[in-house]
Amino acid sequence: MSKEKIQEEKILHPASGYAMMFIGIVGMLLGIALMVLGPIFGSLSGSGFLIGVGITLGIIVETAAIILLCGLKVLNPNEAYVFTVFGKYYGTLKKPGFFWVNPFCSAINPIIKGAPIVTSNGGRNVSISTGGREKKVSLKAMTLDNKLQKVNDQLGNPVEIGAVVIWRVVNPTKAVINVENYKNYLSIQCDSIIRNTARQYPYDTSEDGDEKSLRGSSQEIADIMGRELQQKVEEAGIKIQEVRITHLAYAPEIASAMLQRQQAAAIIDARQKIVEGAVGMVEMALNKLNENDIVELDEERKAAMVSNLLVVLCGNKDAQPIVNSGSLY
């Protein structure tokens, strides 16, 4: 988006609403008084001109008082108004309280009744009506629940991933003027960032374990998503507070095969540890026998002993001992 199209925020400092409400009420009472007293005094004096002037002035004052009261606005904490006057940006009101602004101002907010919000649901966009709301922009922290998406990781494996985004509007002027619908904009950008980020990393770490993965480095990946998403929604006046991965799993069509692979890898790792420990124990046993001169074994007997010990230590079943009652040779 070019800089010429980005609207800079102008903060309004309006008048007190209580004073203007008092003036408006007094004006309405004055208009009613003119419309009533004008015909009375005109009838008493027999002047039709006085009657017409009284009614006309009463209507003018009454209309002006009503227009004046239309400028009264109530703003709650963590809300904002973005005003335009005849299609031109007028200013933004953020301070909570009771105020009076130009009665010809109109508040704008694309998130109104009948404007659908597009959310992702399993890779499909679903339109949800927002319901009737005033044209105030909420500055409160909100949650975007990005539903499950099926994407391919770095290795091409289909995975399902879902995330939740904690966000809030910090610049309501940009939110309602620079983009068509800031909630739709955030949702679409979130879908894009999640897909692009998931494609850059494998689901699980490789054998060396040095690279980042979606499963092993989920918080780091979520932080990367948050930074990239913040850059995309900066022009919409949105601040990303946190991104969390809420769901991560292989797609159903390959989940069973991947589970078998993980089980096989776990068995191999366990066997490797067992063999390493068994070799160390055999080495220690031979060294002890040699140091203490318990028995002298030739190379053939050492090989037989090593074989027997490895079978006992590495076997997945209990070994059945055989007692040798004869001589060693």
Image (cartoon, rainbow, N blue to C red):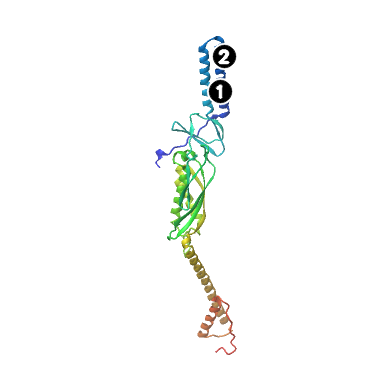
Quadrant location of residue 278?
bottom right
- Counting from the top left corner in percent of width and height, residue 265 is at 49, 68
Nearest to N terminus: mark 2 or mark 1: 1
- At a point 53% along the width and 22% down the height, the residue shown is 62
Q: Is residue 42 above or below residue 71?
A: above
Q: Residues within 10 Å of mark 2 (few under 14, many from 20)?
A: some
Residue tagged 1: 28
Q: Amino acid at mark 1?
A: Met
- Counting from the top left corner in percent of width and height, residue 257 is at 47, 65
Q: Quadrant of the C terminus?
A: bottom right
Instruction: Name the secondary structure under disc 1.
Output: helix
Question: Viewed as shown, does residue 292 lie left or right of 183?
Answer: right
Q: Nearer the viewer, residue 288 or 119?
A: 119
Q: Amino acid at mark 2?
A: Ile
Question: Viewed as shown, does residue 97 lie left or right of 121?
Answer: right
Q: Residues within 10 Å of mark 1 (few under 14, many from 20)?
A: many
Which numbered mark, 2 or 1, is in the foreground of this view?
2
- At a point 54% along the width and 79% down the height, the residue shown is 311
Q: Nearer the viewer, residue 117 or 196?
A: 117
- Counting from the top left corner in percent of width and height, residue 88 is at 44, 32
**Cα–Cα span, label 2 and label 1:** 19 Å
Residue tagged 2: 40
Determine contact: label 2, label 1, CB under 8 Å: no
Instruction: Name the secondary structure under disc 2.
Output: helix
Q: Is residue 156 above or below residue 177?
A: below
